[in-house]
Amino acid sequence: MKEKLKKLFAYYQPYRPLFYSDMFFAILGAAVTLIIPLIIRYITNEVVYFEPAEARYTVFVFGASLIGLVLLEIFCNFYIAYYGHMMGAKMESDMRRDIFGHYQKLTFAFYDNQKVGHLLSRITSDLFDISELLHHGPEDLVISIIKITGSFIILLMVNVKLALVAFAFIPVMAVYAFYYNGKMKKAFKRNREKIADINSQIEDSLSGIRVVKSFANEKEEMKKFKVGNDNFVAAKRVSYKYMGIYHSGLGAMSTLITVVVLLVGVMMMLNGTVTLTDLITFILYITNFTDPVKKLVTLTEQFQNGYSGFERFLEILSIAPDIADKENALSLEQAKGEIEFQNVSFQYEDHAEKVLNHINLKVDAGDYMALVGPSGVGKTTLCSLIPRFYEVTEGRIIIDGIDIRDIKLNDLRNNVGIVQQDVYLFAGTIMDNIRYGRPDASDEDVIRAAKNANAHEFIMSFPEGYYTDIGQRGVKLSGGQKQRLSIARVFLKNPPILIFDEATSALDNESEKVVQLSLENLAKNRTTFVIAHRLTTIRNARKILVLTEDGIVEQGSHEELLMKKGVYESLYHMGSPV
């Protein structure tokens, strides 16, 4: 816990002046609340016995002082409310930057086992609770300590016996709070897990809303949502039960202090050991004493929320990317595109069986290589190893004579362009989406790339042309249009190595012809891997590799493989090579 708190406090570092000023005004505000009852006690205990003229003047002076102190308290409260919250917001922003940056570093292997809703929850609701703790925690703690300590000292000065009666409740309250704090912490952690489940289910349902509606399965989605929502309510019920016990118990003790002090004070007043003005002062300070106790109650809630959120925040930051640059990684500005697989094997972390087993393959620069074979034999996986989306389990992959693990990741991936079957377009304009291939590209470069991808004509058919908003994931475009934008994006990137992952399999025949032409334009003079779904995409390939569970079992041109009458020929006669 010590190490975690150290990391938590490190986020105060850039905002120390703001933090110190926030603490200063918090202390000043607390001091004002302690001074006001003392002035009232002095007026009721001393000033009322002055000569009338002197008493009126003194009351006026102290009255003005009290108004000044109230105005000062208002300013202090405003400062800690506004600037304190701004400090919390900036720290929350820093944390969001850190966790989002870390998300960018994590590999496919991590995302294969995660739900987007859970990851989203850690970057939204978790961080808000942490920022509330970072802002309110220190100031509430300092204010509470000052008020409780100050009240205790002043009450001892007023009457020792009454002060001891009031503070006799403190140990009981501390034990009570400590016990139910533990219960609340566990309950709050469960709440976070349940809300993350709901976020994940909502994200999944809304992302697939077209599928939901096409199957008229809105009721099924509501059923799934109801299960998660009911689990969340059940988790909340437990946490609120403990919170209710906690609040009511401490609230009752706070009220009980006032009642007991009042009763004991009246008895002592009847005995002549306490004056009425001292008892009034006592009652004022008891209120001043119970307020910070309630503030500490709020603080403990915030601590449970914020600290459990920070633990989840650290869980993500502690996950080291399993693929990263070596210490002395080499730069690779522009690869020639010569690729060699040397005895490459691969298996996923949670699978015992190897997806690829001792693959040996040499691809010359500029080669057009097609991969065919039954589904699940590792065609996409083999291509995913080239840009190091996954790390080889055995063997090595060499580009231009250099092991890819010795090349800087950014440089390696800048030399590889991928066109996938499932095109992902970002919300925004056509211009933005094509420019994603090279963020510093000019408008002219973007238009040139679109023309090369046979996309310019359909883009200009829209009223706003390149500045047309395409909606979430490009929902306003057809499959062929989306695919041509993804090709334009790769044209703009201009990499020497290309991977076409079943890029035309989801298109109709007419769209496929246009996209196929774009792909062939893109592939000129580049090392190209084509994961084939339809024969039309591979007939012109210089070499076709046939993969099965036993690895590469056949290779050659389309005609050569048909003459072998092996696996390829049987796939060909079934109508498709996959």
Image (cartoon, rainbow, N blue to C red):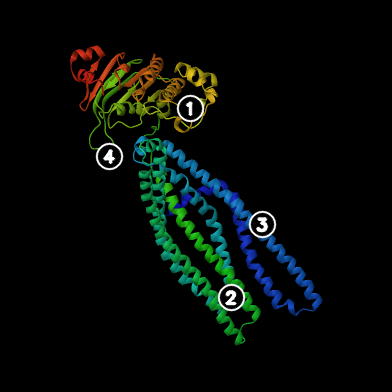
Residue 560 badge: none
Q: Nearer the viewer, mark 4 or mark 2?
A: 4
Q: Alpha-carbon neighbours of circle 4 within 10 Å: few (<14), some, or many (≥20)?
A: few
Q: How many marks?
A: 4
Q: Nearer the viewer, mark 3 or mark 1?
A: 1
Residue 516 position (above or below residue 219): above
Marks 3 & 1, CB-CB < 8 Å contact: no
Q: Position of residue 446 (x, y in %)?
A: 51, 21
Q: Position of residue 224 (x, y in %)?
A: 36, 46
Amino acid of disc 3: Phe
Task: Please state if 74 lies on the left or on the right of 300 as rendered.
Answer: right
Determine which residue is flagged by label 1. Answer: 433
Determine which residue is flagged by label 4. Answer: 350
Question: First in sequence: mark 1 or mark 2?
Answer: 2
Residue at far front of view: 216
Q: Quadrant of residue 49?
A: bottom right
Task: Please state if 544 lies on the left or on the right of 464 as rendered.
Answer: left
Determine which residue is flagged by label 3. Answer: 75
For numbered disc 4, what is the local secondary structure?
A: loop
Residue in the image at 56% along x and 57% along y? 139
Residue in the image at 43% along x and 60% along y? 240
Q: Quadrant of the N terminus?
A: bottom left
Residue at far right of view: 53
Task: Please state if 186 lies on the left or on the right of 41 as rendered.
Answer: left
How far apart are labels 2 and 3 at the CA level?
30 Å
Amino acid of disc 4: Asp
